[in-house]
Image: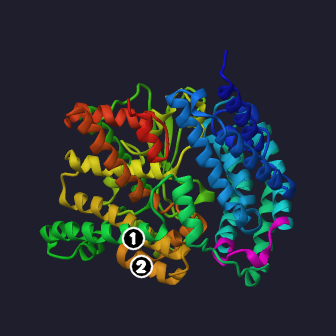
Amino acid sequence: MPSSFTSLVETFLKEEYDDSPTLASSLGLTEYDERLDDTSAAAFQRRIESDNAWHGRFSSVPDAELDTQQRVDRDLLVSVLRGRQLVQPLEMWRRQPATYLNPGLNGVFSLFLHRLRPEKDLAEAARSRLGQVPRSIADGMANLDVAQIPRVYLERAVGQSRAAAKYARELVPSEVKDPEQKRRLSETGAAAGKAFDEFAAFLEKNKDAAKGNYAIGEQLYSSLLREKELLPFGARELREKGREQWDLLSAEANRIAKEIDGGTWQETCDRLNKVHAATPEGMRAEYEEWTEKARTFLRDTGLVTLPKGEECAVEPSPPFQRPILAVASYNRPPAFKDTLKGHFFVPYPPDGTSADEVQKRLEGNCSAGIPTTAVHEAYPGHHWHLVMAKGNPSPVRRVFGTAYFNEGWALYAERVMREQGFFTDPKHLLYQYEATIFRAARIVVDTSLHMNEMTFDEATKHMVEKGNLTEPNARAEVGRYCSWPTQASSYLTGMLEIMEIRTRWLARRGASDRPALRAFHDAITGAGMLPTTLAERAIAN
């Protein structure tokens, strides 16, 4: 018979799925595929009340009623819900236009990405969701308080809306073969495309009135670190960590750069950035090649256990994602389906990008940097981690997690591959350091932006000079930091926490050879996507 805590979790997860059918679909729960998230003002108010009630319920569950792993699950849920509570005063549903774009876009895209049902059923589900897009867009135009929208949010949403219109009209119908299904999708997609275009026009018309502040403030940033991420420091201390790490890493990178061509690491990277694939497809092919090389290295060294049947496809980024994301990304296998196929998305430029800017974007994906990114996104980074996490029996840990572990792990993956000799070319080694330096620069910029101590243009300049980004990629990155506070700081912060956990874990076992490392890697990734404090507890025995 299930425990009272198990029953409580089941009830909570059912509410989560009902509240966000697109989340449920992405997890492989196909019974939700025809529905789209409710974006009415009343629905947002209901969510606030529900989150507060559930936080109280889970916080009151005593240790005595739970085993060791259930206590971790409970504390994970409390941290997730506390994070939601902390950002409630921001009223993002009144300030973030993307709130009304993402359900329709991601909700349709995930259907065809994983293809968990026959094509006829997928087409009908996509048509149903596209048919609900005009309602979501109408909710957005009714709910948004234009004066409170930060200009950067609005500008990003305009680009995303325009890409979404093309996606709905042209690309979604191309996902099916049957002529009648294609025709019906085209009709519904045209109506959805019209709604996306109207949203773009609405936002453009109100551009000058958008005067909101994207900065969340030092107090909230620190509270999110301490109460959601369960870290023992706040924003200002974190910024100092970023500055210290930038100095330490830069010294080592300069040593490597001097061996390569006598320059500083910035000068050497600036020269190496010019050596890249001629086209986005050529870039994708390089990523695919290095993804397989990283997997082969893991198989040959036994540094991790590779689950049978896992697969990582290397593909162009979704068209609607391209205007707002200039870096690689990953989409994990559905948590509640048997498939172990993940998707590594290579950052293609948006349609209509000038030839000059395409070349600048390709510079941001130069040949010397691609091995590190392949490790980060695929092996043993996101793909391998999330395949391992999928095997955890807890449904809570299959659904919820934090970037401070996910991204911290992926950066740790780069580090351990460096330690184990994967990067044999000094140019590749330099770019692994450069990738970590970039994450240190991100910490400085993200904290400074949200403490109101750095402007958007100052942040862009900082990322060009300190993060080895081209100006277009730097602007796209900073726009992302403004829209997603604390996430940019998660990579290096999480990696440093995981390194400390590893040191303690190996010391207790009195070994640090590859079998010991494999045992650590398998254990901590198999524990899920937990805040690092909880991850260490989960593997303590």
Instruction: Say what secondary structure mark 2 lies in.
Output: helix
Q: Quadrant of residue 506?
A: top left
Specify start and end residues of the magenta stretch as a single range: 143-154
Q: CA separation, marks 1 and 2? A: 8 Å
Residue labelled with disc 2: 462
State whether the magenta stretch is mostly helix, strand or loop: helix
Q: Is residue 149 magenta?
A: yes
Return the x and y of residue 233 as percentages of the image width and height: 45, 62
Dot 1 or dot 2: first in sequence order is 1
- Residue 181 position, x and y percent, is 78, 38
The picture places residue 215, in percent across and down from the top left corner, at 60, 74
47 falls in the magenta region: no
| Residue assigned mark 1 | 441
Residue 135 horizontal side relative to residue 101, left or right: right
Q: Quadrant of the N terminus?
A: top right
Q: Residue at x 80, y 38 (%)?
A: 180
Rendered image coloring scheme? rainbow
Residue in view at x 54 percent, y 80 percent: 456
In which quadrant of the rendered image does the C terminus lie?
Answer: top left
Choose between 363 and 90: the one closer to the eye: 90
Picture quadrant where residue 164 is located = bottom right
Q: Is residue 75 visible?
A: yes
Looking at the image, which is closer to me, 250 or 453?
453
Q: Are marks 1 and 2 in contact (CB under 8 Å)?
A: yes
In the image, residue 358 sits, relative to residue 387, either above or below, namely: below
Residue 369 vs 56, above or below: the answer is: below
In the displayed structure image, the side of residue 205 where residue 260 appears, left or right: left
Taking the spot 36% from the left edge, 30% from the top edge, the residue there is: 306
